[in-house]
Amino acid sequence: MSGLLPAASANGPSVDRVLAALLGVSCAVLLLVFGLMLVYVVRYRAASTIDRGRLTDKSWRFEIAWTSATLVVFFGLFIWGADLYVQLYHSSPAALKIYVVGKQWMWKVEHPTGQREINALHLPVGKPVDLIMTSEDVIHDFSVPAFRIKHDVLPGRYETLSFEPTRVGTYDLYCTQFCGLDHAAMTGKVVVLSQSDYAAWLAAQGPTDDLAHQGQALFVRYGCDGCHGGRGTVHAPNLARLYGSPVPLADGRVVVADERYLRDSILQPGREIAAGYAPVMPSFAGQIDESSLLELIAYLKSLSQQAGGVR
Amino acid sequence: MSEEVPSYLADGWTIRSWLLTTDHKRIALLYMASITAFFFLGGAAAALMRLNLLTPTGMLVSPEMYNRLFTLHGVVMVWFFLVPAVPVTLGNFIVPLMIGARDLAFPRLNLLSWYLFMAGGLVTLSALLLGGVDTGWTFYTPLSTSFANGYVVLTAVGVFIAGFSSIATGLNFMVTIHQLRAPGLTWYRLPLFIWSLYATSVILVLATPVLAMTLILLAAESLFHVGVFDPKLGGDPLLFQHLFWFYSHPAVYIMILPGMGIVSELVSVFSRRPVFGYKFVAWSSISIAVIAFFVWGHHMFVAGQSLYASLVFSLLSFTVSVPSAIKVFNWLGTLHKGYVRLDAPMLYALGFIGLFTVGGLTGLFVATLISDVHLTQTYFVVAHFHYIMVGAMVSAYFGGLHYWWPKITGRLYPEMWGRVAAMLIFFGFNLTFFPQFILGYFGMPRRYHAYAPAFQVLNVLSSAGASILAVAYVLPFGYLLWSLVWGERAPANPWRATGLEWKTTSPPPTENFADTPIVTEEPYNYPAPEIREQHV
């Protein structure tokens, strides 16, 4: 059985323990229900003259007993499952950040060092991974049963899926949110390699520019640097060290400049105006595809990691 | 029995006397014919799907056709069979009889409900058959609005119209139960079937309008590009899921609560014992109806809703299963020290308890957050909700149909065939759907017209079960129709049951009762073991 479905991620074995516990509880209850049903149907069959004795009239004691027993078991299961679920949302600062774009009906993957793949995802074993996912059209879902993980991939926003592959091998990847005609063909493979094999695989993809560099070229091509480069006459925010920092807005709120903020600021610049700036930036909605957006954002993120940046 | 008063069936023989009737009993039969047709249509789509899944590559139909088939199956089965099934047929027929009334509170509204139901059904059917819709019955946006053809809107229009039929029926039942109870029939003397239909009606009246609004928004975005759900138009796709499940999760309880009510009746009659913990069973129906409105987010644990929302919805989902567990334990308590007979309705009731328990326990797997992440959107979920909505619910419907058949038609059904069909349904159902739990654990996604070869053995088992289930579902259709002509004539109370519906003739006269009955005793007042005679 485990040959069919290995537990190949760090949280896989703990998910399987929860499933085993649920199976245990279910079997016990099923045994009780079917057992009592069978015993009563035979023992108290209409033709039987067995002494029925006195009827139990204090029913509320039984009610309280089985209601509270059920509640206690359920609450325990809730806490256990919730605890592990919350951990799914913790991404490690050391995580490898890989971008995934879903579209009808394929998966496009972009590695931070610039490698691209379609319907495949190569990962190093034993290193935490954050998939930053978005969709070009409808809702998809990135599901790898061997990792016991799954998350919807939505158009118009970034969803993060964090996990850590722990076993070298090739695993099935499915789209599990119905996405139209060829939904069943939107599958792929996740290939988990040893650290050295992974390095070799990256190198074998040929010389590539990393995502941030590709984004830098786009930054020029779309004319962003005309205002944000600090040379123009337009008063525009400096984007160096922007990523991850708090941004005071014109309406008094303060938001953290994460992927969502950067994305929305490119596509809907009028929505969250940084305090002290005029709302003059044009919208780029419909002009930049999802992959290019990811590269632009990768570039903006790289600015906050290196000193200096756009001047 | 009473030659002087003609039965409702003999009260007029023209087509007009049926199509313009305001008699709740005749309207129940109109509904029964309609939902039976929808059931076999939805079932035929399921049969084609199971046939297609015999081989990993999908041996029968194209992906496009497969997607249309499961959409048709879902839409027809949910809105035109499962949601209306028990309330509009057995409920319509039995509620006034059970409470000693002449009819429902609004007989003409009742007829209008049927016409709305048929209008909605025909509109939806024309969209599904002529144009085809391939979004799934869930109509998730933006797939359904920006990436699908116009037949989505036509389908939604049909569902929208049928929704008014639901609302009217729910309203009719609530007013009837409040206003038309016979003298002496206090709330705690009501049969539990009435309590469960009351709870169902509350959900019908409160949840269906939300579905209607959601469908209007869906149509507005599809037709006029009003940005509500599609992010490209400035909308939010998760908003649709919140609105949709705010109706569609309570809808699951619309389907199952009436079934629970039937089972409470059957277990009591065929054990000749009052229902154990009557008040707990009655109030568990009401609490299910209330909590059902606060669990919709458990459909969205991996959809991108907030972490805190998921935590709350998971806890509430565990809570809603407690009243269901209470019911199961109380049914077992009713069997205890009873005089149990295994007539066909009782076999269906016991089958219900078994299938419902499996469906409920596997519900814990998907209410638990971390295991839901692995199991949701796979065949595990498909199996889970079919155990509740099809296995349990259809067993309860058939149980009630057999139990009240003598009252409805004045004929007895062939008992042996009834028992054979009940057992065949239980076996066929489990063979069809149990393998799907295992497929789901191994990760087979739902709504795939083709699959990995490793999944084939379990899929073949499931399809084999489906062929048995198909025969088992057709069987009652055959022998029940047979009994209409050749069945033995039924006495007024063939089961020696309590309940006012058995105090009038079989079939009842149009006015139901010659004199308004007066209730002086508790429900399910079967003689205590000490004093009852032994020749049962």
Image (spheres, coloured by chain):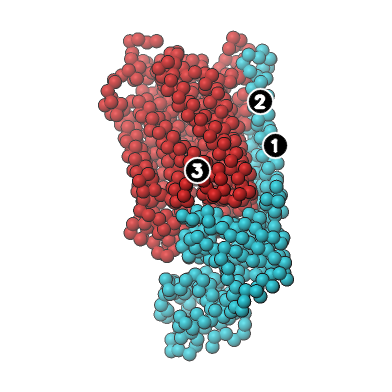
The chain assigned the colour cyan in the figure is A
Q: Quadrant of residue A70?
A: top right
Q: Quadrant of residue B484?
A: top left
* Residue under label 1: A28
Of mark 2 and mark 1, the one earlier in the sequence is 1
Circle nearer the viewer, 1 or 3: 3
Q: Looking at the image, is A303 positioned above or below residue B281?
A: below
Q: Position of residue B433 (x, y in %)?
A: 58, 39
Answer yes or no: do the residues labelled 1 and 3 have beta carbons within 8 Å? no
How many residues crowd around disc 3 within 10 Å: few (fewer than 14), some, or many (20 or more)? many
| Disc assigned to residue A38 | 2
Q: Chain of mark 1?
A: A
Q: Position of residue B84 (x, y in %)?
A: 42, 36
Circle nearer the viewer, 2 or 3: 3
| Disc assigned to residue B115 | none
Circle 2: element type: helix
The chain assigned the colour red in the figure is B
Per the model, the C-alpha gap separating discs 1 and 3 is 34 Å
* Residue under label 3: B49
Is residue B83 toward the left or the right of residue B364 in the image? left
Q: Looking at the image, is B50 positioned above or below residue A108?
A: above
How many residues crowd around disc 1 within 10 Å: few (fewer than 14), some, or many (20 or more)? few
Residue depicted at 40% across the width and 33% down the height: B37
Residue depicted at 36% across the width and 57% down the height: B222
Answer yes or no: do the residues labelled 2 and 3 have beta carbons within 8 Å? no
Question: For the residue marked with disc 1, what is the amino acid?
Answer: Ala
Question: For the residue marked with disc 3, what is the amino acid?
Answer: Met
Circle 1: element type: helix
